[in-house]
Image: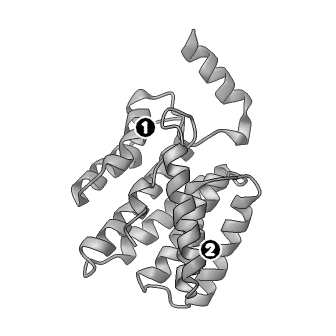
Amino acid sequence: MTKLLLILSFLMTGSLINAQFFSDQTLQQTALQLDNAKTDSDYDTVFKTFSEAKTSEKWQANYYAAATLYLKTNFLLKNSPNSPLGEPNESARKLAMQALASEKNNGEVNILLALIHFQKIRIKTAADPQKELKTATGFMAKAETTLKNNPRLSFLKAEIAEKQGNKTEAIKFYKKAAKEFETSDPSSASPNWGRQLIGTN
């Protein structure tokens, strides 16, 4: 009965659906485990589950596959900077764009795209860094219309401030992101990934 109520509330919320809710238990568990990925192959395993999922919840699977590639690229940037980072970043962008095609006003999808475009500047594959920054801030502005107190949004603001040489602002937003991750409820329907981003930059 509880599962039926969850599915009903899932259907009734329309485009306000949170990306973390899956009726498929395997995908739900994989979404919750994303923050436990510690190695390159951990990320590959999580990515494989989402990218190969035969599910009606395709946009969520695409969203999480994109988030996994974004985190993997971030992990490689820190631990293996000579790896080819352009390919996972571009694959993440394509998957996130597929999710966006279904969920245009979803703040989480927009913030993921903003993070991916900004990451392209960090990994130095952007042909025009200013254009990438403009694209990232455009997606961020869309996300801000629906997201409040979001740790991934605060993290992106910290990254942008740091890139622009504003250390005080960057520290403020890194602290805000850390606090938002601390107070977020891992059992809620909202996405909860990205804790490993704090302290990696």
Q: Residue at x 26, y 54 (%)?
A: 38
| Residue nearest the observer in this picture, 143 or 25 | 143
- What coloring was used for the rendering? one colour
Q: Quadrant of residue 130?
A: bottom right
Tag 2 residue:
136
| Residue nearest the observer in this picture, 133 or 149 | 149
Residue 173 in view here: yes
Locate residue 89, reporting x and y percent: 43, 70
Q: Residues within 10 Å of mark 1 (few under 14, many from 20)?
A: few
Q: Please, is residue 43 above or below residue 154 in the view? A: above
Locate residue 180, reporting x and y percent: 56, 51
Q: Quadrant of residue 12?
A: top right
Q: Nearer the viewer, mark 2 or mark 1?
A: 2
Tag 1 residue:
54
The residues tagged by marks 2 and 1 sit, at their Cα atoms, a distance apart of 31 Å
Upstream in the sequence, badge 2 or badge 1?
1
The three-letter amino acid code for the residue at tag 2 is Ala
Q: Residue at x 43, y 41 (%)?
A: 31
Residue 112 in view here: no
- Tell whether 130 sits left or right of 93: right
